[in-house]
Image (spheres, rainbow, N blue to C red):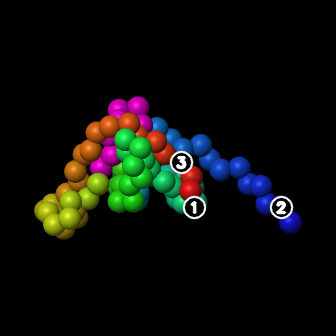
Amino acid sequence: MNDTKSLPALPDRLSSNPRSPHYVEEIFENNIGIKLNGKERTNVEEYCISEGWVKTPSPKALDRRGQPLLIILKGKVEAFYS
């Protein structure tokens, strides 16, 4: 049997945090890859292709709610299904 289910198009801006307005649950049913300046990143929390940035969690710093602070990295962003 050949299940050729078409994948939904990746949005311009996407967040992996369910509390964010940019979270889309259907997208996360498949594996997503993010490249920043040609290098694949595995710890991306949110991205925006048109503005050219990704947000990654800080290794140690936490905000007042106990969530990791997000660091913005700028460059050429590419999103793809892996």
Q: Distance between the residues labelled 1 and 3?
A: 13 Å
Disc 3, disc 2: CB below 8 Å?
no
Residue 54 sits above or below residue 52 on the image:
below
Q: Distance between the residues labelled 3 and 2?
A: 22 Å
- The residue under label 3 is 80
| Residue at the extreme front | 38
Q: Give the magenta-colored segment's residue range.
A: 48-55
Under circle 1, the secondary element is: helix
Under circle 2, the secondary element is: loop
**Amino acid at dot 1:** Glu
- The residue under label 2 is 2
Residue for point 48% across, 45% down: 79
Instruction: Find residue 21 and report its horizontal and vertical position in percent.
Output: 39, 47
Mark nearer the viewer, 1 or 3: 3
**Which quadrant, please, contains the C terminus?**
bottom right
Mark before the other along the chain sequence, 1 or 3 = 1
Instruction: Find residue 5 and report its horizontal and vertical position in percent.
Output: 74, 54
Q: Is residue 15 visible?
A: no
* 19 in the magenta segment: no
Mark before the other along the chain sequence, 3 or 2 = 2
Residue 79 sits above or below residue 75 on the image:
below
- The residue under label 1 is 29
Q: How far apart are marks 2 and 1 (CA)?
A: 19 Å
Taking depth in this image into account, of 21 and 76 the one nearest to the observer is 76
Instruction: Find residue 74 and report its horizontal and vertical position in percent.
Output: 28, 39
Badge 3 crowding class, 10 Å Cα cut-off, few under 14, some 14 to 19, many 20 or more, is few
Badge 2 crowding class, 10 Å Cα cut-off, few under 14, some 14 to 19, many 20 or more, is few
| Residue at the extreme top | 50
